[in-house]
Image (cartoon, grey):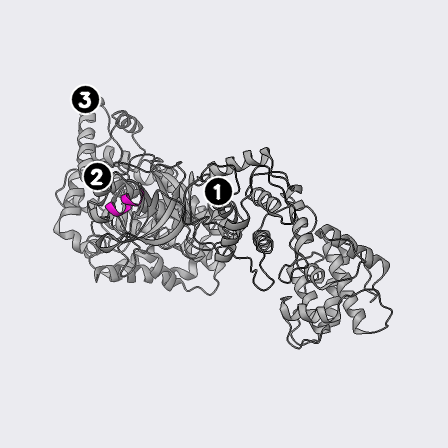
Amino acid sequence: MTDPWVQDVQIHLNQTYSAVPGWVLVEATGVTGWSTMYGLTRALQHELGFTELSENFGPGTFAAVEDIAPIGPTTAPNTKAQRINNIIRAGLYCKGYNGGNGVLDGSYSVMTVEAVKSLRVDMGLSASNGWMTPKVFKALLNMDAYVLLDGGTTQIQTIQRALNNRYIARADFFAIPADGLFSRAVQTALLFALQYEIGMDDGVANGYFGNGTQAGIRAQAHVAEGSTDTIQYFVHLFQAALTFNGYATPFSSTYTAATATVVRAFQAFAKLPVTGTADFVTWASLLVSTGDTSRPATAADCITAITDEYAATLRNAGYDTVGRYLTNYPGPDPTNKKIQPGELATLFAHGFKVFPIFQEGGDAVEYFDESQGRYAGRTAHAAARAYGFPAGTTIYFAADFDAYESEVYNSVVPFFEGIVAEFRDVGDFYKVGVYGSRNTCSIVSEVGLATTSFVSGMSTGYSGNLGYPLPTNWAFDQILEYVEGAGDGAINIDKDVKQGRDPGVSAVTTPATYLDYMDWLQGRAAYYKVAIDPDTSTPENDLVLHYLRQTYNDGSWFLAAGPLNQDFITWIDTLGRERVYTFANPGGGTYISLSHLTAAINGFTWANSYPASPTKVQVPDMTGWAGDLVQTFADFHAYKVENPEADAHNFARQWIGGFKGQYDDSDYEADVAAVNIAWLLANGGQTTVAGAFRSYFTGPEYAVRHAVYLDRRFSGSLGNALEMAIDIWESDITLVQAMRGGILLADFVSEPDIKQFIPDISQAWADVLRDKIQG
C-alpha cells in the first residue's frame, strides 16, 4: 500500500541530492524498499563528507557516524546536522514510526525522540534517552523489521530481542531483526552469542563454527536437565537453537524436563544419540548444516565405481549404503561417474544397498527449467530401467548450487515439475527425490514434487543451508568429503548420514530388451486378431503402434494417426507384462521414447502409403519431424520474449537435436527412426513393426541413419529438406494447417509472431541434419 510519508521521503531525497555525484535516483512509489534505504544511506554518506557513495552502510560509514554520535535534539539552524536529522526522520517513517508527523523540517523533536525510543524497545534494547546511536542508525537504514511479520512467531521474536539486548555492546555484534522469522542473520547472531559466552574477545569472535568455537562448546556448553544460567547464557542459547530448528521450548534460564523431552525428539529426528542433553554433537547439528562431521554415518556417495577393494574399505568403515550416478554428463570428455557394468553385482555381493542419483549439470540456475526437467526425467527413468532398478526406487535429482529462494521457486520448481510430468507419463514407476540445500529440498518437497530429500549439508556456506532446519522428509544428509582407506583400497567419498526413510535397493532385475518386448507385443497383436477379436478391422501393426503410442490420442492425433483400439490396449494390460516406455539410443547420447516414435510411425501407417513428395510436407510429417520443428518456433518465440537480442538461427542450431528443449536429441532420433522404419514397412520388405525395429536398430544402416533419412524422405537433397521445412508454413493441406496452428496455440503463439523467423530456423534445421550426416 502506498504511504504518502514514504513517498515524500523519496521525493525529498531526489530533490536534495540529485546533483550529488554518484547519486542514484530513488523511485517515488510510496513503498519502502531497498532502493529507498540505499538512497538514505547514500544521503548520509554525503552529509558525512564521503565523495564516493555506495549502498552499503559499511565500516567506513559506521566509523564516521561514531565520530558524530550520539545524535539528538539540536537547535542549530541550517546546518548539516539538520539534514542528518531529516535522514533519521525519513528512516523512521520508512520503518513505520512517527518521528514528526511526516514532516522533514531538520529538527530532532520530541516526536523524534519518542519514535527512536519505540524503535529501540522493538529491537529489544532499553528505551534510553531516544538519541540515535551508531548501531541503531545502521539498523534504521536497512529493511529489517522489529515488529512481528506474517509467518513469524512471538517465541523467535523474544529470542531475537534478547540477543540484541545482551550483545549489542560487543564490537562486532550488530542488531538483528526482531520479526519472529528465523534467518541467516539470526543464525549468525546465535554463533556470535555462543562465542561471546565461551569467552572469545572482540575481533576474535566471527560468527563461524570454527575450531575455537567447537572447542569452547565441548569444554563449557554441555548443559542438561537441571542446569541453570547464572553468569553464562548457555541454557538460553541452546533453547534458542532448538526453537530455530522447529523444536519449540521455553526460552528461559532453566533446562527443564520438558526441554529434555524436546531435545530427545530432535536427536531422534536428526539421527543423533538420544541423550536428552546438550552435548556437542547436538549443539553442532543445531548450529551448522554439517553437524559434527566426525559422527558415524552408514551411507556414502561417490563418482568412483565400486570394486571389491573399495567395497571392503567401505564395509570396514561401517558403511552399508552407497549412492551412485545413473549417467554421465553428455558433453565432451565427461567424467565417467555412472554405474559401471557389473558394479551393482559387486555392491550387492558385499551386502550394500544402493540409491541412484541423476546429475547432468545443475550447478547453476541457468540449467533449470521445465524442459530440462523433462529431459532429466526421461533420461533418468530410461537409465534406471536399463540397470534394472525396481519399481518404487527413489531417484535423487540434483540442484547443486547456492540457490536463493526466488531461484528455487522460479527455476528449480519448474525443473522438478518437468521431472514429475515425465515420470507420470511413463506410469510413475519411480519416485522423485531432490538433492540440494536444506531450503531447496524443503521447498521442492513442500510443493509436492519430491518424496524424500538428499541434503547437501557439507555446503555450509550456502544461503539455503544457513538459517534453515533440516527438511522434514530428509533421507540422506551429506556432511563430509574425505578419503576413506589406504593403498589400493583408498577411495574418495562423501559421507552421508542415513535417516532411514529411503533404505535404498538391495537387488535389481535385468529387464527384457526393447526388441524382445516388441517381438512379444507383435505376437500378442497377432493372437488378438485370431483368438480375441477376429472381427476387428485394426491391422496387426496398428494394434502394436496403438498400444505404444497411447498417450498421443487427443485433438489432431485422432485425425493424423487414427483412433486407438482401446479394447486391445485394455486386453494387453490384463496380461501383466511390464510396459517398456523408453530404450537407449544404440547410437549413444540419449534415450528414445517409444510413445513418441510409434506415434510418428503410426502417422505414416494410418496414411496407408509412404509420402511421395520430396519437397512438400504431408500430414504424416506433422506427427514427427515437422511437428517438432513447429514446436521449435514456439520455443524460440518464448525464449525471445525473455532474451530480445536472441538470434533465431543460433538458437535453433543449439535447440534442435541437442540436449535441451522439446526437440532434443531424444525426439530428433525418434523422428529419424520413424521415417526410416515407416519406409521399411512400406518399401523395404518388412511386414511387422517388430521386424522393422530389429532390422533398423541392429542393421548396418543404423550407423548412417541420418543419410538414410535424407535419402528416404528428401530424395537425398538438403535443398529439398530446406524447401519442405519452409513448406510447413505454406501448405494448403487443411490438416497440416490445423496441426501447425494447434501446436502454436498451445504455447500462446500466433503465426504472425513467427513468420519472420521461418527462413533462419528452417535453415538451422537443415544445417543440423547436414551436421548429423557428417558425424
Of helix, strand and loop, which one carries label 2?
helix
- Whether residue 552 is visible: no
Task: Give percent across and percent down for residue 551.
Answer: 34, 37
Residue at numbered disc 3? 531
Which mark is first along the chain, 1 or 2? 2
Which mark is first along the chain, 2 or 3? 2
Task: Give the side of residue 232 with respect to residue 450, left or right.
Answer: right
Is disc 2 in contact with disc 1, using a CB cutoff of under 8 Å? no
Task: Give the side of residue 328 with respect to residue 424, left or right.
Answer: left
Task: Give percent across and percent down for residue 474.
Answer: 44, 41
- The image's mark for residue 63 is none
Of helix, strand and loop, which one carries label 3?
helix
Residue at numbered disc 2? 349
Chain part drawn in magenta: 312-319
Amino acid type indicated by mark 2? Ala
Task: Give percent across and percent down for residue 556.
Answer: 37, 40
Label 2: how many residues lie within 10 Å, few (<14), some (14-19) or many (20+)?
Answer: few
Image point 87% across, 69% down: which residue?
A: 75
In which quadrant will I find the C terminus?
bottom left
Image point 58% across, 33% down: which residue?
A: 257
Task: Give percent across and percent down for residue 661.
Answer: 37, 53
Q: Is residue 422 magenta?
A: no
Discs 3/1, front: 1
